[in-house]
Image (cartoon, rainbow, N blue to C red):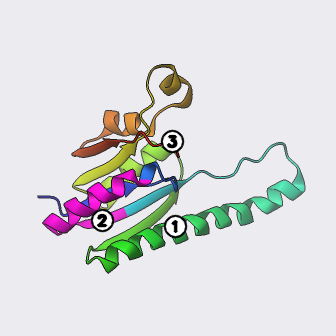
Amino acid sequence: MYKRILVPLDGSRRAETILSHVEKLAHGIGAEIVFIQVVRPPMVIGRDAAELKAFPQKLEKLLEEARQYLEGISGKFSEKGIASRTLVVTGPVVKEIMSAARRKSADLIAICSHGRGGLARLFYGSIAAGILQQADRPLLLIRSRKET
C-alpha cells in the first residue's frame, strides 16, 4: 500500500502527536518514514554589518539543531525496526514539504494539525491547511488538542 511516508515535524510536542500513528502504520505495512523539518531562516533586521555577518552561523546552528532533533526521532524508530531517514530544508514550509514529497516519492504525507480554525487560522495561517489544499497524494491528518 504505502512504501514511503513523509512526516513533517516542527520540533513541538504537538506536532509529535502524529508519531504514534505513523509508527503503527509503518510497522504494520513495512513502510519507510522520511522525517522532514523545514527551517525558517533567522530574521535580519536592518543592515547592521555584525548582524549580517552572524547570519550564516545562526542559520547553520538552526539547521544542525533540526538535524539532531530528527536524527533522535529517527533513531527511536530504527530501534523498533522501522526504516527511516531525515531531511532538513529551508524555505516556505508548505512548498518545501510538497517538494520533498515529490522528490522522495512519498506515497503518504502524515501530519498533525494544531486544530486552529476561524480567526486564528486567518491570522496565523495553517501549514496543515496549505498541505491539504496542495496535496496530490494521500494525506493522514491527525488533529492535536494538546496545549504544548
Residue at the farthest top position? 119
Which residue is at 24% across, 52% downward? 108
**Local SS, label 3:** loop
Nearest-to-viewer mark from 3 and 2 = 3
- Asked if the residue at tag 3 contacts the one at tag 1, i.e. Cβ–Cβ closer than 8 Å, the answer is no
* Stretch of the chain drawn in magenta: 16-34
* Residue 79 is covered by the magenta coloring: no
> 121 or 6: which is nearer to us?
121
Which residue is at 35% across, 52% downward? 18
Q: Which residue is mark 3?
A: 147
Q: Which residue is mark 1?
A: 69
Q: Residue 33 bears which disc, if any?
A: 2
Q: What amino acid is found at the position of numbered circle 3 in the picture?
A: Glu
Please indicate whether residue 9 sits to the left or right of residue 53 in the image. Answer: left
**Local SS, label 2:** strand
**Between marks 1 and 2, how big is the CA–CA gap?**
15 Å
Query: Earlier along the polypeptide chain: callout 1 or callout 3?
Result: 1
> 138 or 141: which is nearer to us?
141
Quarter of the rendering containing residue 129: top left
Query: Earlier along the polypeptide chain: callout 1 or callout 2?
Result: 2
Main secondary-structure element of the magenta-colored stretch: helix
**Between marks 3 and 2, how big is the CA–CA gap?**
26 Å
**Between marks 1 and 3, how big is the CA–CA gap?**
21 Å
Which residue is at 43% across, 68% downward? 73
**Local SS, label 1:** helix
